Amino acid sequence: MDDKNFCDFINEDVPMNHNIQKYMMVTRNKLREYGRIAVSYSAGSDSDIMLDMIELVKPYEDCGEIRYTFFDTGLEYNATLRHISEVEQKYGVTVERIKAKKSIPAACREHGIPFISKEVSEWIDRLQRHGFDWSDTSENATSEKYGRCKSALDWYFSRRNTIEGRKSKYDIARFKLLREFLIANPPPFSISDKCCDYAKKNVSKDFDKVFKPNLKIIGMRQAEGGRRAGSIRNCFTPTGENTIANYRPLWFWTDEDKRIYKKTQQTSALPTHIWVKAAQKPSTFITLKPLKPCKP
């Protein structure tokens, strides 16, 4: 829409919600400011809102080139892939499906299996590679004994403090009884987060080398929590020496903001299904009827 219609739209049709109004305007400005824009689309709820907002507010003229990307890990539900096709038809856009460089089963066989989360898998992987004794004590577990894995040791023994002097919320204590479990059940197999590197991270870097975007838009929210969200302070990270500018239009949005937006815009969402792995065909999935909302 042109500028006049956009102003009228903001004043007359958009709900009186600070986050929705503000980031509609910020998003429109970002689409004008940058010439090559890569939008990472996951087919999830946040990504649906992000794509809807971009297509709604993008200017007719002087808008940067937008490319939507979906990183196909090879383990996607059929409902997810159908939803992407439906989104393409609804908005008249193309979502580029980018295959993993190495399948998740192959990466797991070669590097190790993910456990609980990417963060936990990374720390355990580091400890395993240094021959860590899970029943060791904090006093004995030193860098001299295990080599260059001080950060992993600090994570395991909750030895990291924040700037304010408080214990870090990103150590093993965040996962109740995890250290006790590892002591009682030392993992007999390799644990690693490398499957994510081959399925998404490395593939994304290859895409960036070809397209050369000067802005990446990500449907990430502060409310997600976790280490990744904890390292970010606002909705925009400017271009660095070796990094591309990142914009997160939903960063400060709450669940209530999302509810209001979806109600107003009637965005299409991936239906909730119960997924059951078919015992007779391990490689296939069957769906049951969609879950009905609980009565209040």
Image (spheres, rainbow, N blue to C red):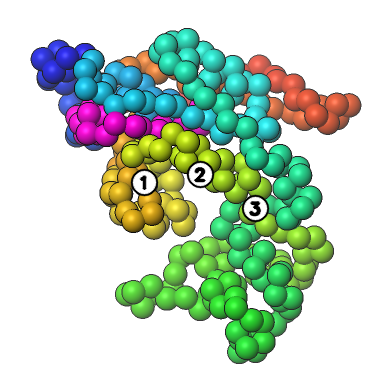
Whether residue 160 is situated above or below residue 191 in the rendered picture:
below
Q: Which residue is mark 2?
A: 205
Image side of residue 172 versus residue 61, left or right: right
Whether residue 133 is situated above or below residue 172 in the rendered picture:
below
Residue 234 percent across, percent down from the top left: 28, 49
Q: Which mark is residue 244?
A: 1
Image point (76%, 60%), residue name: 190
Tell me the CA gap for discs 2 and 3: 15 Å
Image point (62%, 41%), residue name: 199
Residue 48 falls inside the magenta stretch: no
User: Which of the 4 image quarters holds residue 134?
Assistant: bottom right
**Amino acid at the residue labelled 1:** Ile
Image side of residue 260 versus residue 94, left or right: left
Disc with the residue nearer the chain's start (2 vs 1):
2
Q: Disc 3 on helix, strand or loop?
A: helix
Q: Quadrant of the N terminus?
A: top left
Determine crowd level at label 3: few under 14, some 14-19, many 20+ residues with C-alpha closer than 10 A. Answer: many
**Amino acid at the residue labelled 2:** Lys
Q: Which residue is mark 3?
A: 194
Q: Disc 1 on helix, strand or loop?
A: loop
Image point (32%, 54%), residue name: 240
Q: Furthest-front residue in view?
A: 210
Q: Nearer the viewer, residue 277 or 95?
A: 95
Of the two numbered discs 3 and 1 in the rendering, the one whose residue sits closer to the viewer: 1
Range covered by the magenta-colored residues: 23-43
**Amino acid at the residue labelled 3:** Lys
Determine crowd level at label 2: few under 14, some 14-19, many 20+ residues with C-alpha closer than 10 A. Answer: few
Tell me the CA gap for discs 3 and 1: 23 Å
Disc with the residue nearer the chain's start (3 vs 1):
3
Q: Nearer the viewer, residue 245 or 276?
A: 245
Tell me the CA gap for discs 2 and 1: 11 Å
